[in-house]
Amino acid sequence: MERAFEEIANRFDRFLGRLHRQNNTQRGLIVLDKSSYGTSLQGLATNFRSVGHRWGQLFNLTDVPLFVDSRATRLIQYADMVAYALRRYYENGQSEYFDLISRRFDAQGGVVHGLAHLVRPENACHCQACRQRVRN
Ligand SMILES: [Zn+2]
């Protein structure tokens, strides 16, 4: 869970950094569903901002993550739908919903930055994210 959060926070920060270099400066806010991971992720994000993470430091996030009740905001429900589509794709090999969103992940110059699949090198995977990583 912490590795996934680190990936998401870093990729979101880099996305905002690219916008900044295109003269579209914005600050980001990570909103998460209340969960048992709340306390540990909030501490992790605070450390990211002050001491950095494995790839550097976060510069474009305005605050520590906010934890909200998913029933209170549609944003979390949208994120749940994306997670559902990804889970069906990666765990069950069903691409019906993934195909609807696969071109919506952050990308620039044909390189997808907003989707990563973390697998051990010995476990060959032919998903969209892994195929692209092999090419680059
Ligand atoms: Zn993969």
Image (cartoon, grey):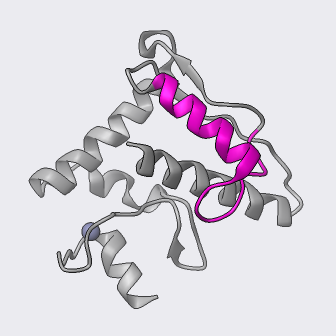
**Nearest the eye: 104 or 17:** 17
Magenta-drawn stretch contains 56: yes
Residue that appears at 40% across and 80% down: 133
Q: Position of residue 38 (x, y in %)?
A: 48, 24
- Left/right placement of residue 72 relative to residue 89 reads right
Residue 95 appears in the rendering: no
Residue that appears at 79% across and 42% down: 27
Q: Position of residue 62 (x, y in %)?
A: 78, 36
Does residue 68 lie above or below 132 as drawn? above
User: What span is colored magenta in the figure?
Assistant: 38-61
Does residue 44 lie above or below 136 as drawn? above
**Nearest the eye: 87 or 8:** 8
Q: Position of residue 13 (x, y in %)?
A: 68, 53
Residue 103 appears in the rendering: yes
- Left/right placement of residue 11 relative to residue 77 reads right
Residue that appears at 32% across and 75% down: 130
